Amino acid sequence: MSLNTALSGLTAAQTDIAATSHNIANVGTIGFRGSRAEFADVFSYTPQSVAGTTVGSGTQVKRIAQDFSQGSIVGTGKQLDVAIEGPGFFALRATTEAAGAQATTVFSRAGAFGMAADGTIVNASNQQLLGWPTAANGQVLSEALTAAVPFQVPLSMGTPVETTSLSLGLRLPTDPAMSGSQAAVPPAAPFDPAQPETWAHRSQVPVFDDAGLPVEAEMFLVRLADPTLAAPETTYEVHVIRNGAAMAPDAGNTVSFGADGALLPGTVPLVFNGTAGSLSVDLEGSALNDAPFQVVSASHDGRSVAALSALDIDPQGTVWATYGAEQRVSQGRFALVNFANPGGLRVMGNAAFSATAQSGDPLTGSPGAAGFGQLRSGALEKANVDLTEELVDLITAQRNYQASAKAMETSTAMTQTIMNMRT
């Protein structure tokens, strides 16, 4: 009898040491919830037992209780590191790689998130963060757990537009000596972009294709006529090269400037045609001056897709995304979950839990609402483990183990004494 009692004490002390060691091992685990072994004494009763003289039969492990107290918050500066200040859990969707496997929802306090290649917000275990859809202004559309979906922040936004119109403001030199490498006015040889002596000026121009991507495009200016007393105009011939191919002028491709250096009316815009479509070139505002060639302004009607430039999370859990220079747009709101009995949650590992009948059904709410904590972006909640306290508990458990071992040794010695008795 006493041997079994001592053995139960050894088993209990070993379980206590294991629980304490588990806490110590995870003192650096983000969002970890500490645990403790809880025991109860064992008594055996029979109808013939006398209450005043009944001796106990040892101890037993009743449960490993989880500690859901608040852990310390530390700043990290990383935008997708999120800590919960107060009650609540993040809702995560855990998927498996098995074909046809159904995704399950787990709950965690660990808020170290990152962004996958497709814009999905995930943790280190590749579990997807769940959130509620919102309108562009941040208004939540539904707060039901069944309505929560994995957060996916688009990496770009907008519709691409191909460039069809180009506006340039040029400053062209009045002095023919500033006409680049052009050999003569007009040039003796036909225009050839590979022959600098056939053109005076060259410049890159902004052009987007139908996918909103910039394409290589250049404009060349050939000086055709210098001003004279009889004809005071200065004339240039315009050529456009797109993706290495020359675009053909629709009607004409010459522009003229008067004696005052201003662009003569009726010479713009110029229209060029190519395999990718037509391009209108407007040189309105261009003029001659006593300085080298210069492009003073350039604009076009093409538009690229705006890339994600900033991501913010407010204390209410709304995720705001900014694309290019546009206003920020809401991408959803964090779904927080709580339980009537968090101690009844099942430990799943990776600092995550799952609901059970003992924990009750999940209760959902927005961060900052009644019964739910607020979020702090750029911070993480550390494990709620006091290392000093755990070391003291470890020493206590070790002494309990040694005492139970001594009790077992004593019981064995008594049994051996009886076995050695002789009549």
Image: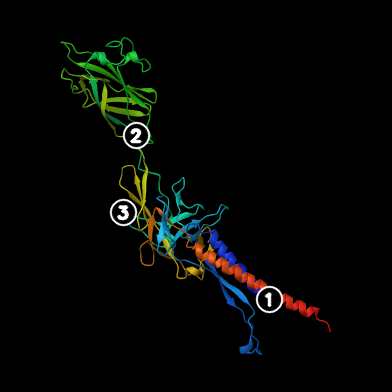
Residue 137, numbered label: 3
Question: Would you name the residue on which mark 1 appears?
Answer: 4
Picture residue at 25% right of the left edge, 18% below the top: 236
Residue 19, percent from left and from top: 57, 65
The Cα–Cα distance between marks 3 and 1, rounded to whole angstroms, is 67 Å
Quarter residue 369 falls in: bottom left
Residue 58, percent from left and from top: 63, 77
Which one is in front, 126 or 267?
Answer: 126
- Amino acid type shown at disc 3: Asn
- Amino acid type shown at disc 2: Glu
Which one is in front, 220 or 210?
Answer: 220
Local packing at callout 2 (Cα closer than 10 Å; few below 14, some 14-19, many 20+) is many
Residue 162, numbered label: 2
Q: Earlier in the sequence, mark 2 or mark 1?
A: 1
Looking at the rendered structure, the secondary structure element under dot 3 is loop
Q: Quadrant of the C terminus?
A: bottom right
Which one is in front, 280 or 360?
Answer: 360
Q: Is the residue under label 1 in contact with that under label 2 (CB below 8 Å)?
A: no
Q: Earlier in the sequence, mark 2 or mark 3?
A: 3
Local packing at callout 1 (Cα closer than 10 Å; few below 14, some 14-19, many 20+) is few
- Compared to residue 77, the image places residue 197 above or below, namely above
| Count of numbered tags | 3
Residue 238, percent from left and from top: 29, 20
